[in-house]
Image: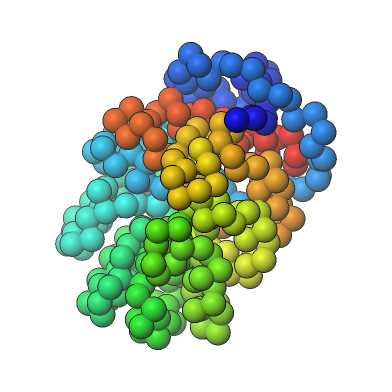
Amino acid sequence: MKEIGPTRRQLLQAGLVGAAVSLSRADAARTRPAFGGLPRRGLKAQFQLGLASYTLRKFKLDETLAMTKKVGLKYICFKSFHLPLESSPAQIEEVVAKVKEAGLILYGGGVISMKKEPDVHRAFDYARAAGMKVIVGVPAPDLLELVEKKVRQYDIKVAIHNHGPTDKLYPTPASAYEKIKNLDRRIGLCNDIGHTQRAGVDPSVSAEKYADRLLDIHMKDVSSATAKGHGVEIGRGVIDIPKFLMTLLKIKYAGIVSFEYEKDPDDPLAGLAESVGYVKGVLAAIS
């Protein structure tokens, strides 16, 4: 598998990884071709980097907040492991306070499944209580009319998450877009670029084509562009990460790019740190 990107030394010289890179595994030091021919766009990224907390699903809340800070991320989207959907308002308030004390911003929740009408009401009540700006969700198509009503009532965005070739509802961003294109523009897409690639779709092409509804991104890399592809450290897989990031600059994406590192669930910190450092290195090279 051909890899692209800067060498680890180049990233260190750029001062972009800092202490987080010191956590990377020894094999992360293997040489990668430099960015050489990448064009500089002279554009400042309008998006922010964050974390989808599913990455740290095996860890408790305090550990999750600490590790998020350790890899240099400020924004976080909570999976229910870290803030259960059935939490009381008081429990939600307590968790939100911890996030603020850690210097982080809780911008969203998900992925949240909405199979029945009560699921929709619960998701919006949960998000409103936590001050979330976006719900990353999977609403059943027959509930989209209700979702639109709640979006207008609460002014909370809903980003529909695609789950790849084995998903019957939303395998690709295109499949979700077709169902929401005539709905309120606050209903959009969370482009999970790993699942998009696994479905045989170029994430860059998808992001540009549906830029008007791109509300959130799950940032990752995968081993192959097939249903059998699995998560790997960003820069080690088959996704053209520089091309994708250049696309985000081109379309002036202004949401959050959340890392969802699914490999090594029991010990994810080194791989996550390497992935964050790689993306920051690419951004420094092209912007």
x and y, in percent, of residue 226 in the image: 50, 48
Q: Nearer the viewer, residue 28 or 152?
A: 28
Is 30 above or below relative to 66?
Answer: above
Is residue 249 toward the left or the right of residue 97 in the image? right
Q: Position of residue 171 (x, y in %)?
A: 46, 63
User: Residue 16: which quarter of the image?
Assistant: top right
> Does any portion of residue 73 appear in the rendered image?
no
Please tell me which residue is depicted at 82% across the width and 40% down the height of the picture.
39
State the quadrant of the C terminus: top right
Q: Position of residue 223 (x, y in %)?
A: 51, 38
Please, which colouring scheme is shown?
rainbow
Task: Give me the residue at 35% from left, 81% from top.
Answer: 143
Observer able to see residue 171: yes
The image shows residue 45 at horizontal and vertical percentages of 68, 48
- Residue 123 position (above or below residue 85): below
So how many labels did they put on this image? 0
Left or right side of 96 for 108: right
Q: Residue at x 71, y 60 (%)?
A: 251
On the rendered image, what quadrant is the N terminus found in? top right
Identity of the residue drawn at 35% across and 46% down: 54
Nearer to us in this view, 60 or 214: 214
